[in-house]
Image (cartoon, rainbow, N blue to C red):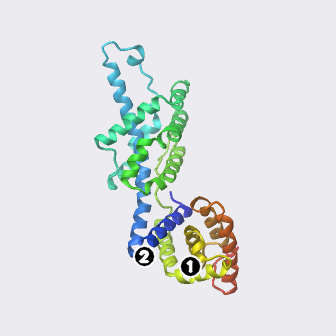
Amino acid sequence: MLNRRHLRIKVLQSLYAYYQSDKESVIRAEKEMMEAIDRIYDLYLYFLLGFAELKNVAEHRIEENKKKILPKEEDLNPNMKFVENKVIAMLEDNYMLIQASEERTVNWVGDTEREIFRKMFLHIRESETFFEFMNNGNTGFEEDKNFLIALFKTEIANFDHLYSFFEEKSIHWLDDIDLAATMVIKTLKGFEEEGANDIMPLYKDPIDEKDFVRTLLKKTIKREEENLKLIDELTSNWELDRIARMDVLLMEMAITELQEFNNIPVKVTLNEYIEISKFYSTPKSNVFINGVLDKAIARLEADGQINKIGRGLMN
């Protein structure tokens, strides 16, 4: 499921798109942001459904090999370790996965889709990971689970044809693949031989998390003028238009969050935006942003503009 950092990143991306579009519509920006967050779950479902597709290709190949005019011993008595994988069987029968994919119309139906998995299986068959697990002689549920996780990490999640498919579906998905893949790995690791083995929801608390992203987006836009004024004052040695746009947006979001969310500790807000800057801005941005936000916190606290409810939230 998405955590607050993932949600902050989605707000950041939406703000960037909003300002690139000449501030066309806050309502539209919010709608597109919520749709983009929602689509991450589709990506997660596509990945989970892909295991059964690979199994189908493998089964078809086994049946075709048996029909050869002069079948070999390995054709007549194939290694069934992959097609009999217990975790894949659980995914095929998982009620939550079936229901979610039907509700969201996520599936691998179509000639193009089948060809992707045919090529993927041919690629997987030649991989070191596949060979090692198919021939190590180990059996059991944990072995099946480790097999699937290793295969997903090394061969499936990074498969080029899958990337192309996702890019055609949504250009924004390329930014979300790592997150969706992490969700898949956590899901597989959590499966047990006996148990419900539910798939992950998108949000931990849908009402609270949706309110968080909507409020952060709209309030950051609303506070733009005063936020930029504060940043300008705190970066007196810099012209504001010379600071990287992503740095400015991150600082605007942080300053807004410090004032609008009285249940989020100051230190949490500061650390989150510094961490995000390491991936979404320039190499030295985290040091710069840290320095500016430290000054911003001191100024806002002195002016009584940061009011936290609860013990320890000011630290």
The residue type indicated by label 1 comes to Glu
Q: Residues within 10 Å of mark 2 (few under 14, many from 20)?
A: some
Front one among 287 and 100: 287
Residue 251's x, y, as percent? 60, 73
Work out how far the residue at label 1 is from the one at label 2, CA to CA, in angstroms: 22 Å
Give how far across and how far down residue 150 sits, in percent: 54, 38
In screen coordinates, is 98 left or right of 245?
left
- Which residue is located at x 52 percent, y 40 percent? 149
Q: Earlier in the sequence, mark 1 or mark 2?
A: 2
Q: How many marks?
A: 2
Q: Residues within 10 Å of mark 1 (few under 14, many from 20)?
A: some
| Residue furthest top as drawn | 70
Quadrant occupied by the C terminus:
bottom right
**Residue 228 at x, y percent in the picture:** 57, 80
Q: Is residue 281 above or below residue 256?
A: above
Could you tell me the amino acid type at mark 2?
Lys
For residue 269, which quarter of the picture?
A: bottom right
Residue 306 visible in this rendered orientation of the protein? no
Determine whether the residue tagged by mark 1 lies in a helix, strand or loop.
Answer: helix
Q: Is residue 8 above or below residue 313?
A: above
The quarter holding residue 128 reads top right
- Tell me the residue at 61%/62% (across/down): 282
Relative depth, front residue between 162 and 196: 162
Q: In front here: 195 or 14?
A: 14
Q: Which residue is labeled 2 in the image? A: 23
Disc 1 versus disc 2: nearer the observer: 2
Identify the residue under disc 1. 260
Of 297 and 95, nearer the camera is: 297
Observer able to see residue 22: yes
Task: Tell me residue 277's x, y (percent).
Answer: 60, 63
